[in-house]
Image: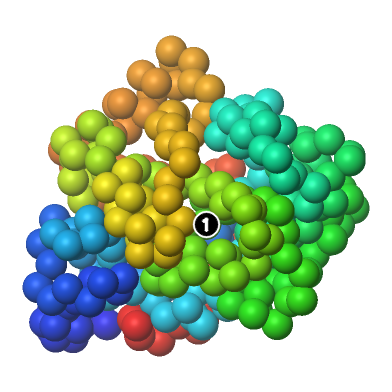
């Protein structure tokens, strides 16, 4: 895609959630040659980061269509999002919340990947998952989860309802976050609970670095929420926010905090050089499998 076509694509930008026209331009985003653990050829134009003054959503525009992204997820590396429950503070907090809920018999985890969060819950729960990556879904099944769909868009055809639905690290991948939560709410039992974990665009580091923040450079990340958006969305859905907690994505050692701080500052000072260094690092430690021809234009 040429620079001219990108400019044309961004000429009429509106918020994907509330439809507000002419949102604020936060800054431009780098091109990306890495998606779901695989190298992309050619690279995808990064577009730009915008913020909505009405609903407070931050979002990437333009971006790949959902169909294009789904095709890339399906052929992504099967260990790209593997996490240990002992290192995921968000999972641990969610598990504590679930145990305190009056209804917690059936748990549906959206984008459950290899089922490690569900596996960390007591066996007395009925555990269900939605996962698009076939090998990851197979591993989730081996860990005791029942995979009911390979895409959250197919939940409308699912008959079951659930006492708890969890969605970790998926909302930032959705094109319309409000509609996504609405779809999930339809599968909740009366009095059920929805637990969501994602990035916070009002975090101090994010506000300092704007579109240069590392979380925005990941091409799979297209929607970014925050506590203000959560309150607006909860009111719109008739699902008031009961609890909200901010935390680091994982328990971080001093060395890891220092390392990520240096990376953030390096990216802020020299984005192209930092991207090149990351690309070389990936080539050393990751599979050199490449994904091509799964996308032709931005949606």
Identified at 31% across, 26% down, the residue is: 261
Q: Residue 195: x percent and y percent?
A: 56, 47
Q: Residue at x 23, y 32 (%)?
A: 204
In which quadrant will I find the C terminus? bottom left
**Residue found at x 52% / y 29%:** 250
Q: Position of residue 138 (x, y in %)?
A: 83, 61
Left or right: where 141 falls relative to 182: right
Is 241 above or below relative to 47? above
Q: Nearer the viewer, residue 273 or 90?
A: 90
Q: Residue 272 at x, y = what percent?
A: 24, 50
Q: Residue furthest top?
A: 254
Q: Which residue is mark 1?
A: 170
The image quadrant of residue 235 is bottom left
Q: Is residue 269 above or below residue 250?
A: below
In the displayed structure, does residue 68 sit left or right of residue 285?
A: left
In the displayed structure, does residue 91 sit left or right of residue 65? right
Q: Is residue 268 among the parts visible in the rendering? A: no
What kind of colouring is applied to the model shown? rainbow
């Amino acid at each position: 895609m040429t620079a001219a076509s990108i400019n044309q694509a961004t000429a009429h930008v509106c918020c994907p959630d509330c439809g507000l026209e002419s949102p604020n331009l936060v800054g431009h985003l780098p091109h990306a040659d890495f998606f779901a653990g695989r190298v992309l050829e050619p690279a995808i134009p990064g577009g730009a980061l915008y913020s909505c003054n009405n609903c407070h959503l931050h979002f990437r525009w333009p971006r790949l269509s959902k169909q294009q992204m789904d095709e890339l997820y399906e052929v992504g590396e099967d260990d790209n999002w593997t996490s240990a429950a002992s290192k995921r503070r968000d999972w641990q907090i969610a598990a504590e919340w679930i145990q305190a809920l009056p209804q917690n018999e059936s748990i549906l985890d959206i984008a459950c990947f290899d089922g490690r969060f569900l596996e960390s819950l007591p066996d007395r729960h009925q555990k269900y998952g939605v996962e698009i990556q076939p090998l990851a879904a197979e591993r989730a099944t081996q860990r005791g989860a029942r995979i009911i769909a390979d895409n959250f868009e197919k939940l409308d055809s699912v008959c079951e309802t659930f006492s708890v639905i969890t969605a970790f690290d998926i909302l930032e991948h959705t094109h319309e976050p409000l509609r996504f939560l609405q779809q999930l709410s339809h599968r909740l039992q009366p009095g059920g609970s929805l637990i969501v974990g994602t990035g916070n665009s009002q975090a101090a580091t994010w506000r300092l670095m704007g579109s240069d923040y590392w979380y925005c450079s990941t091409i799979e990340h297209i929607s970014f929420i925050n506590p203000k958006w959560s309150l607006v969305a909860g009111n719109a859905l008739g699902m008031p926010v009961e609890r909200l907690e901010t935390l680091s994505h994982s328990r971080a050692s001093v060395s890891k905090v220092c390392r990520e701080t240096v990376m953030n500052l390096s990216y802020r000072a020299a984005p192209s050089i930092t991207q090149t260094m990351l690309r070389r690092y990936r080539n050393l430690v990751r599979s050199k499998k490449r994904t091509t021809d799964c996308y032709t234009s931005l949606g």
